[in-house]
Image (cartoon, rainbow, N blue to C red):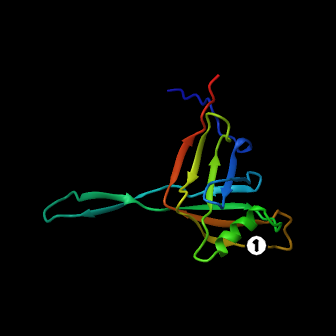
Amino acid sequence: MTVTFTNRVMPCSSKFQVSDDGGSTFEEYAGFLTVLDGWMQERITGQENGMGMDTPVIGLGPKNPITLSITAFYSPTTGDLYDTVKTQFDAECGGNLIVQWGPTGFAPGSLVHTTNVDNSYVSALALPPFTASDAKPLLFQFKIFTTGVDDTTIPIPPP
């Protein structure tokens, strides 16, 4: 069987945005992002074995929340990604930070993933490690705890 890819995902075409106002506006931070990982969502599962049974009875429940791990370039400039993430992390009871990414960008016809608009919080924030003998750019990490990720396709305008 031959598989033909017609829409390859290339890092140079990916886009990444965050919103700290409930999804009304999104700020582009694609140049800051280096890794976005961990967006597998699972369901609560259970099993019970009955007496004399060799195969358990299994059950599926509701979906578990998702934790996204994000690594990005550190910049101490006000308004940059680190500043936006830290502001929401430091907010009383945690501020809502919505993450949106498009593996092939945000052009018409592109698939876009967006964390839940009502329940998407910065649950962890790690300052960049600093090594005096290393010239690599500084990176910081943060985690987004959300109830889910919605997939949408950007509409293609009529001709």
Between 29 and 20, which is closer to the camera in this rendering?
20
Quarter assignment of residue 75: bottom right
The percent coordinates of residue 121 (x first, y second) are 58, 66
Q: Is residue 41 above or below residue 131?
A: above
The percent coordinates of residue 102 (x first, y second) are 64, 45
Total label count? 1
Give the residue at x 26% y 58%: 58
Quarter assignment of residue 99: bottom right
Quarter assignment of residue 112: top right
Residue occupied by mark 1: 129
Between 124 and 147, which is closer to the camera in this rendering?
147
The percent coordinates of residue 93 (x first, y second) are 57, 76
Q: Residue lying farthest top?
A: 159
Dot 1: within a 10 Å radius of its alpha carbon, few (fewer than 14), some, or many (20 or more) residues? few
The percent coordinates of residue 96 (x first, y second) are 60, 65
Give the residue at x 52% y 49%: 150
Quadrant containing the C terminus is top right
Give the residue at x 64% y 74%: 91
Q: Secondary structure at mark 1?
A: loop
Q: Residue lying farthest left?
A: 52
Give the residue at x 64% y 44%: 103
Q: Is residue 127 above or below residue 19?
A: below
Between 32 and 117, which is closer to the camera in this rendering?
117
Type of residue at label 1? Answer: Pro
Between 50 and 28, which is closer to the camera in this rendering?
28
